[in-house]
Every structure is written in structure tokens, then in C-alpha cells.
Image: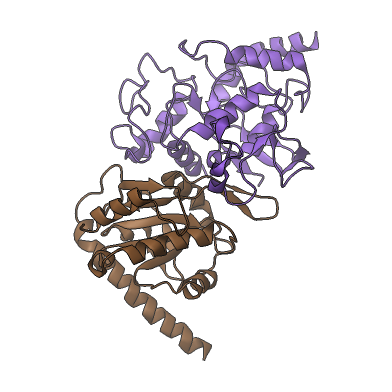
Amino acid sequence: MTLRLVTVLALVALPLGAALAGDEYVAVPGGVFQSALKYEDAKDGVRVAPFELMRTPVTNAQFLAFVRSHAAWRRDRVPSVFAESRYLSQWSGPDELGPAALPQQPVTWISWFAAHAYCNAQGARLPSWSEWEYVAAADETRRDARKDAAWRERILDWYSRPSNRALPGVGLQAPNAYGVQDMHGLIWEWVEDSSAILVSADNREQGSADRAKFCGAGALSTADSENYAVLMRVAMLSSLAAADVTTNLGFRCARDTP
Amino acid sequence: MTRIIGIAAFVLAASLSSSATSTADPAAAAPLPPDSVYQLAAQLTDQDGVAHDWASYRGKPRVVSMFYTSCQFICPLIIDSDKAIERSLTPAQLQRLGFVLISIDPVRDTPKALRGVLEARHLDPLRWSLLSPSAADVRAFAALLDIRYRVLADGDFNHTTALILLDADGRLLARTEQVGARLDMQFLDAVRRATGG
């Protein structure tokens, strides 16, 4: 009942929310939580300092405004070392969205470098993986809903849907317990330290000579193998290079608490 | 006395950096290729405390790695690999090659720490550049070179290791993750080709 009420309220608030979906940040209190990844150096949990996170992912409209003021990031000018050829390929032109990219849709086909540059230009940064995972653990009412099988099921359901359908706009889903939206169920998101995720994409490599690739404690393994939704994100991010783009990979920015 | 040393270091650094710049100058006239790592606008500080534009390393092929000076295990092996390459080249080939080590730990890798490694490992500063980016740029360098690293709770690092051969314009020619005294022969062949056979 409460859940339904929250959803209804979210729908009612929608037009307002959509209009405000600019660079709106939500304050996230710090805390300690157990990552789904097994960190040998943080067995008692990962400490997250207070920070601020964008309430919704960056939209096509927001990224268009950035590209218009930072022409080096136009798709016809960006060096290939920062973004592969499909960068912003859903737009009809280098500085226009066109019918296949609605203003309120999250921007995708974005490389890590482009996401990084956008956030820097706002005086912000990309969230760290730990920050992202911490906020993504929440459902509408609880800051850590990860033990709830029904919630896990609901999130997983999105991952099983085909990705060839048009993306909904941002801010249509109910906010989570922090007031942040679309952590699940809309897109995949870059994080600042995507390149910190040392999970081997290939299980056969575990424990072999390949460990020598990792100076120190070696590759990460998973602490919560039931948390498929998070682990799929980890697997995806660890497989990408920073110039890569994909059909449903976007981002949002974070910043330190002032 | 310290001031004299400081000045001497500065003069030495200035002469080194001007020589690096003059090597890069002829090539710098042409626009950078889109796939050049020198597209990244960033500055790095060397073992003498001198800041260099990353793009000023354009101009000759270089073997680039990321490391940190307090690394006990793999990082010394990176330098072993570089030195094995050094020993395998002719003097003429060596003249055409540079070695670059970029720190993932700029907070602790001060010029003094970088110079310590340079001296302890007897690295010729004319050929070797040990550099710290700004803390905000480390991830971008790692992304550019596809090096993965994670800061551990105690301030140490997990990281992947690679030697990356760039051409004079900063394009990737070869990459190996085999480090240590035993050289990756294919990588060495690529270095030889890049430095004129």
C-alpha cells in the first residue's frame, strides 16, 4: 500500500520532476556498507563519505547543451582516443538530437572520457563505484534492500528485457530512500573508477599465472554471489575500455559535500 | 647550500626540458592524429619538480608504463623489463627511444621520491622520464593506457601492469603484460622496428 502510494505520488510529481531534472543533486549521507565485491582490504565494510549525487542520469538535452559549449566533444570532432566511432550515434547530427533521441531520455552511446569531461565541466566528478553501489542498494523505503528477494527479482526483471526498445525518459521511476532515481531499470552507468574493477572477465584465469597481472592482493572476487544485478554491472564495466560506448550505457555526476 | 643544489637542479631540469621540447617541436607542427594519447591535455611533474605538457613527449617512440615508487613487487619488474629492452638495442636505436613511467600515486610520488628511483636504479635521465600527473588526472591516464588500478584501504594499490609502445605521435604500436627480466620477444621486435630496425 505504501509502495503504491509512493508510486502514485511520483507519477503526480512527474511533470514538475521532469522540468527540474537539470543538474539537481541529492545529498547522500555517508555510511559503511558491505559491497557485493569481496575486498580483502575492507572486510569490515566499505566506508562511503557523505557526497551528492545527481537525482537522475544526464539526459540528451543536458549533454547537447554541453556539446554546444564544448565543441571538442562533438561526435565529428572528438578524437578517437576518447570515444569510438559510435559515440552519440543516436543523435541526428553533431549538435542536434533528432527524432531518435528525445531530450528527456538519458544520454547513452557515451564514453568514459566524455562522461568524465561533462562532470568536470559542471565542477563535479563521476561517482566512485562504491558510491554508486551504496546508493543502488536502496529501494523506495530502505537504504539497504539487497537482502529482499522480491526486490532483487524486480531489478533483475529489467535486465532480462531486450535493450532494443526506446529508452524511457529519466525521472519516471519512484525515488529510492535517498531520493535518487533510476539507479536500476533504465540504463547502465559509468563510474569514475571503472578501471578499478579488476574482476577478471574470464573465470578460467582465476588463480592462474594471470594473477601476476595484479600487483598486490590480486583480482577481486564476489562476496555476494546472489546479487546478480550488481555483479552484471561489475562484469560489464570491467569489460569496457574508456573509449567504448554502448546502446544503454550513460552516466550521472557526483560531487563532494560542500 | 640547499639553495645552490636547488638552483643546480633547476638549471639541469630547464636544460632537460628544453631538449625534450626541441625534440618534439618539428612533429608538433602537424596536427595530432585522433588516436594519439597526446590528445589528453594534462601536465606531469618530473623528478626535478618541473612540469611538462603531456603532449611535449611527442616526437619519438616511447615505452610507457604506470607504476608507483613504494610498490614492492611488480613495479621493480617493470623497470627490469625496460632495462632489458635497453640492453637489447643498439646505441643508435636507443637514441631514438624514450622510457616513461607515470605514477598512479602522485600524492606520495613527489619529485624526491621519483628521483630516488631514478638514482637507485641508475636510470639515465636523458632517456628516462619518471612523472607524476595531478591527482585528478590519474584515472584519465590509466584510462588512456588501459591500466586498471584500485586504491586499497591502507593506501597501497592493486593494479594491472603493461608496457606500452607508442610511436612518435602517441599511437599504440604494441603492448605486453609480460614483465620481468624475460622479455616479450614480439614486443622487443616492435620496439626495434619503431627505432629503425
Q: Is residue A152 above or below residue A31?
A: above
Q: Which colour assignment does the render follow? A: by chain
Q: Nearer the viewer, residue A257 or A130?
A: A130
Residue positioned most to the bottom? B1
Q: Is residue A180 left or right of residue B35?
A: right
Q: Colour of chain A?
A: purple
Q: Is residue B136 left or right of residue B28?
A: right
Nearer to the camera, A82 or B81: B81
Residue A22 visible within the image: no
Please report the residue visible at 42 percent of the width from the left and 26 percent of the height from the top.
Answer: A109
Q: Quadrant of residue A53?
A: top right
Residue B102 at x, y = what percent? 46, 58
Image point (70%, 41%), residue name: A39
Residue B166 in view in this figure: yes
Say which colour chain B has: brown
Residue B3 in the image: above or below residue B186: below
Give coordinates of residue B119: x percent, y percent. Answer: 48, 75
Q: Residue at x 26, y 70 (%)?
A: B91
Total marks shown come to: 0
| Quadrant of the rendering where the N terminus of chain A is positioned | top right
What is the x, y in percent for residue B53? 37, 60
The one nearer the camera, A5 or B71, is B71
Query: Does residue A13 lie above or below A127 as drawn?
Result: above
Classify residue A9 by image quadrant: top right
Q: Position of residue A158 (x, y in %)?
A: 60, 13
